[in-house]
Structures are given as structure tokens and as C-alpha cells.
Amino acid sequence: QVQLVESGGGSVQAGGSLRLSCAASTDIAYMAWFRRAPGKEREGVAAIASYGRINYADSVKDRFTISKDSATNTLTLQMNSLEPGDTAMYYCAADWVWWILLPKYKYWGSGTQVTVSS
């Protein structure tokens, strides 16, 4: 069993930045960030493979950066130029299978709230 614990959410004004972190209990090959806004489906935001491949949703490309520190098993999402549309609960996910941005990962964190005001 893999435990994932997110941190770093909060409230920020449009144009601001936030940095999310996800601490994994063990090294795992594929990790991703998802988000769910009220009344909307869960959406894949960014995903990273241990060998370096990265995928972003079009809505966050050029604004968000995903990275992973393999020494500490910590996944990070740097979010810049935040918009009100980025308001959502953000979840960390992980698996031994490369699901890219599909919400089929086996392990999930409990989420951290991001709120962007205009």
C-alpha cells in the first residue's frame, strides 16, 4: 500500500502562485496531479514518469510545472499565473502503470484545496 499526503494548498488572488507537494511513502514509477472543481468531473492536470516523460493538460500548459524528487519521493506542482478557473481540490495520484492523465491511478491522496479569487 502506498500512502500519499498532499500539502501546500491555500487561497490566492488571480495571477498569483502556489506550490503543491505530495509526499509518497515509497518510490513509485508514475505520479500525477488531478483536480476536481465543484460540479465538474475530475481532471488530469499533469503527470510524470520516473524516466522523465511529462504530460500536461492544455489548460495548464506553460503555467504549471510538475517535478519529482526521487531522493525524497516527493511530487511537486508549481502553479503560476493562477486563474479563478483553477479553483479546485487537487489530488496526488500514483501507480506502477502509466495512465498519463486518465483517472485510473491506484493510489490517491486525500486532496488539498486551491482557491483563486478574481
Image: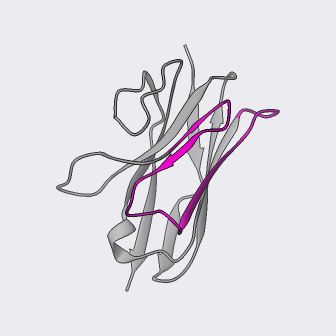
The N terminus: image quadrant: top right
Q: How is the image coloured?
A: one colour
- In the orientation shown, which residue stands out farthest toward the right? 71
Q: Is residue 76 above or below residue 80?
A: above
- In the orientation shown, which residue stands out farthest toward the top? 1
Q: Is residue 68 magenta?
A: yes
Q: Toward the viewer: 13 or 94?
A: 94
Provide residue 40's location: percent of width, then percent of height: 20, 54
Provide residue 53's location: percent of width, then percent of height: 60, 39
Q: What residue is shown at x 68% (from left), y 31% (from top)?
A: 51
Q: Is residue 18 above or below residue 20?
A: below
Q: What residue is shown at x 67% (from left), y 38% (from top)?
A: 52
Q: What residue is shown at x 42% (from left), y 26% (from top)?
A: 105
Q: Is residue 2 above or below residue 46?
A: above
Q: Toward the viewer: 14 or 104?
A: 104
Left or right for 59, reference 82: left
Provide residue 32's location: percent of width, then percent of height: 50, 39
Provide residue 12's location: percent of width, then percent of height: 50, 77
Left or right for 77, reference 46: right
**How many numbered badges does the structure rendering display?**
0
Q: What residue is shown at x 47% (from left), y 74% (from top)?
A: 82
Q: Is residue 72 magenta?
A: yes
- In the orientation shown, which residue stands out farthest toward the left? 39
Q: Is residue 68 above or below residue 71?
A: below
The C terminus: image quadrant: bottom left
Q: Which residues are magenta?
A: 47-73
